Image (spheres, rainbow, N blue to C red):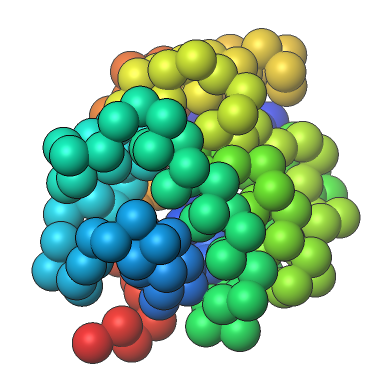
Amino acid sequence: MAIVRGVFCDLDGTLVATEKANFAAYRAALGEFGIEFTWPVFLTTWGEDSRDFLPRIAPELSAGEVAGVRAAKARHYPAFLGETELNRPLARTLQTWSGTARVALVTTAKAGAVAAVLKHHDLTQLFSFVVTGDDTERSKPAPDPYLLALATAGLRPEDCITFEDSESDIRSAEGAGVDVGRIEWSADVA
């Protein structure tokens, strides 16, 4: 890699530990449909889009009910933002890069959740742009989110680096040709 011109970053589990908040919001949402959601089951879904994991973990739900769970999760999520924790060293690193590179967030999270988390942690101004799960038809692990980020930034993959935490996210970035720095950080979620 030559000069880094683009620095991308994932949100959930990378820049912000959102595990507790996501679990609580999905648990409340699924509870509305009479489905018990446990921490071990939640851990099997980490890094996946809810469009993919909800039919797998709750096959009894119709397509309309899956949409209802997703809407209920979005409604419940803001109440649990206090359960999230910022990865301060990574945030400082991104702030440093923002003076010389395009810094962008590339996440499977939905736009409303992303906006709420960024506002809660005062990160809104850190990013040149944000790619959310609402912006591409195919989510991570498909390369589409990163291809959109590259196109939006007007950069080549070899000019960029990204920070990611999950195998699904890493496959997405690598599929688009972007080098990955793996983040193995999380708030205490035990």
Above/below status of 66 relative to 15: above
Left or right, 150 with respect to 64, comes to right
- Relative height, residue 147 to residue 57 (above, below): above
Residue 60 or 98: which is nearer the viewer? 60
Viewer-nearest residue: 136 or 97: 136
Residue 9 visible in image: no
Residue 53: which quarter of the image? top left
Residue 117, percent from left and from top? 67, 64
Q: In which quarter of the image is the C terminus?
A: bottom left
Q: Which residue is drawn at 50% across and 56% down?
A: 73
Residue 106, image x, y percentages: 56, 38
Q: Residue 148, relative to residue 89: is it above or below?
A: above
Residue drawn 62% across the image and 23% down it: 135
**Residue 125 found in image quarter:** bottom right
Q: Residue at x 16, y 37 (%)?
A: 59
Looking at the picture, tell me which residue is in the foreground, 87 or 65. 65
Asked whether the viewer can see residue 190, the reply is: yes
Q: Where is residue 143 in the image (x, y as percent from the top left)?
A: 40, 18
Instruction: Tell me if 103 is positioned left or right of 41 in this view.
Output: right
Rendered view: 45 above or below 83: above
- Residue at x 58%, y 54% (from the top left corner): 74
Q: How many labels does the image show?
A: 0
Horizontal relation, residue 53 to residue 3: left or right = left
Coordinates of residue 38 in the picture (x, y in percent): 19, 71
